[in-house]
Image (spheres, rainbow, N blue to C red):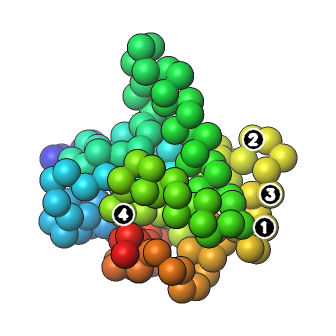
Amino acid sequence: MILNTDIKKNFYGSPSYYDEYVNALMWLKADSRFDDVVLTEWTEGHQVVALADRRVIASSKVYPSEAAEVASRYQDLATFFFTTDENRAEDILYKYGASYVFLRKQFDYKSSCKTKLPCRGTNTLLARMLAKKPLKYLEKVYESKNFLIYKTK
């Protein structure tokens, strides 16, 4: 898949960031089963589908007939990333059968925290994942300068 270099520069910043991003998605594609489900930040969902060819819990592409179901999934995604209750996060992973969590190290708080959620709390699951603290049900399987991939245990 070849993308216009202007798109690479404008959307992703530097070409090295873009290349690292594609490498992370290609790793995910190569090291996961075709039927694995990926939980990721909602702004990344459609790209995981396009580049890694893996299903995601929620994507930016929504059909009108799916609106209510996808709205519920988005709420679960927000709960997953910003909860302080590991059991609640684990329930969400298993509810959707997620095998992997794909995460940018520079999480997009601007698009993700439009309400007064405790988005930047140090005890949220997201903060613990970014700090690479051990979690009882997730194992870090891929890390680069800008990306982390966790696998469910």
Q: Residue at x 51, y 80 (%)?
A: 136
Mark 1 crowd level (few <14, some 14–19, many ≥20, 10 Å Cα): some
- Nearest the viewer among 57 and 106 is 57
Locate residue 67 relative to residue 98 in the image: left or right.
right
Residue 148, image quadrant: bottom left
Residue 147, image quadrant: bottom left
Query: Could you tell me the amino acid type at mark 3?
Result: Pro
- Nearest the viewer among 91 and 56 is 91
Residue 121's disc is 1
Mark in front: 1 vs 2: 1
What's the CA distance linking mark 3 and mark 2?
Answer: 11 Å
Locate residue 92 relative to residue 62 in the image: left or right.
right
Residue 101, image quadrant: bottom left
What's the CA distance linking mark 1 and mark 2?
Answer: 15 Å
Query: Could you tell me the amino acid type at mark 2?
Result: Lys
Q: 15 above or below 4?
A: below
What's the CA distance linking mark 1 and mark 3?
Answer: 5 Å
Asked if disc 1 and disc 3 are in contact, CB closer than 8 Å, the reply is yes
